[in-house]
Image (cartoon, rainbow, N blue to C red):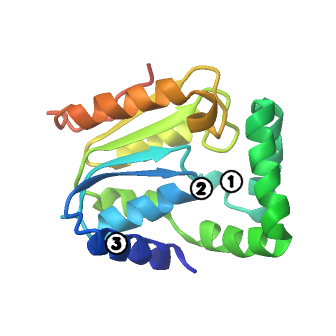
């Protein structure tokens, strides 16, 4: 499936549940689904959280993304590394490379400028995939974007820094839009 296909499937699921306004959270490739959903169904998305978003345009190759994923396994906790490795072993290389193609084809940096709602970009301090400069660029491309960096975390920050991620999301959800629309610098 393409990223727009995934976003359409999420929209249908929310429609079936009669959810008409929500804070949408996407992690890694899921951040692409979230941006696409907010782009095509703006009335549905109240706020958007992009945790460890992909793909940095300067690193948009299968080789680079694969290497960065391997690099991330080194900085992750053993339990996070086991989750990622287990997912890969369960789904196999064919699935990985099929999904990788869809991920590389989607231009999140183009879609984010069409998103009307406030956007929070979360990244782990040690994330080799969602790098600091690119996350700030992505947030700055949003109409109302901000960045929070989670100390000590890697790409799977929701697993290794659960409390910090939950707190950041809760505070973002409770906050109003920024008056200046500028990207907030990392804490």
Q: Secondary structure at mark 3?
A: helix
Q: Which x, y percent locates residue 94? A: 82, 75
Give the crowd class for mark 2: few <14, some 14-19, many >=20 residues within 10 Å: many
| In the image: residue 138, left or right of residue 114 | right
Give the crowd class for mark 1: few <14, some 14-19, many >=20 residues within 10 Å: some
Residue depicted at x 84% and y 69%: 93
Q: Earlier in the sequence, mark 2 or mark 3?
A: 3
Circle 2 or circle 1, nearest the eye: 2
Circle 2 or circle 3, nearest the eye: 3
**Residue at numbered disc 3:** 11
**Residue at numbered disc 1:** 59
**Residue at numbered disc 2:** 55
Q: Which x, y percent locates residue 115? A: 29, 58
| In the image: residue 89, left or right of residue 160 | right
Vertical position of residue 55 compared to residue 17: above or below: above
Q: Secondary structure at mark 2?
A: loop
Mark 2 in CB contact with mark 1 (< 8 angstroms): yes
């Amino acid at each position: 499936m393409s990223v727009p296909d995934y976003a359409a499937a999420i929209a249908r699921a929310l429609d079936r549940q009669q959810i008409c306004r929500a804070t949408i959270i996407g992690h890694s490739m899921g951040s692409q689904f979230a941006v696409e959903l907010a782009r095509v169904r703006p009335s549905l998305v109240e706020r958007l959280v992009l945790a460890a978003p992909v793909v940095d345009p300067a690193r948009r190759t299968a080789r680079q993304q694969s290497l960065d994923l391997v690099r991330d396994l080194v900085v992750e906790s053993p339990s996070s590394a086991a989750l990622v490795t287990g997912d890969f072993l369960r789904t196999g290389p064919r699935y990985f490379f099929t999904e990788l193609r869809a991920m590389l084809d989607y231009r999140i940096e183009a879609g984010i400028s069409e998103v009307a709602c406030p956007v929070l970009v979360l990244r782990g301090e040690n994330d080799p995939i969602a790098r600091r400069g690119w996350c700030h660029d992505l947030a700055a491309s949003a109409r109302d974007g901000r960045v929070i960096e989670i100390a000590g975390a890697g790409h799977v920050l929701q697993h290794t820094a659960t409390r910090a991620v939950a707190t950041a999301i809760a505070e973002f959800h409770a906050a109003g839009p920024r008056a200046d629309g500028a990207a907030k610098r990392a804490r």
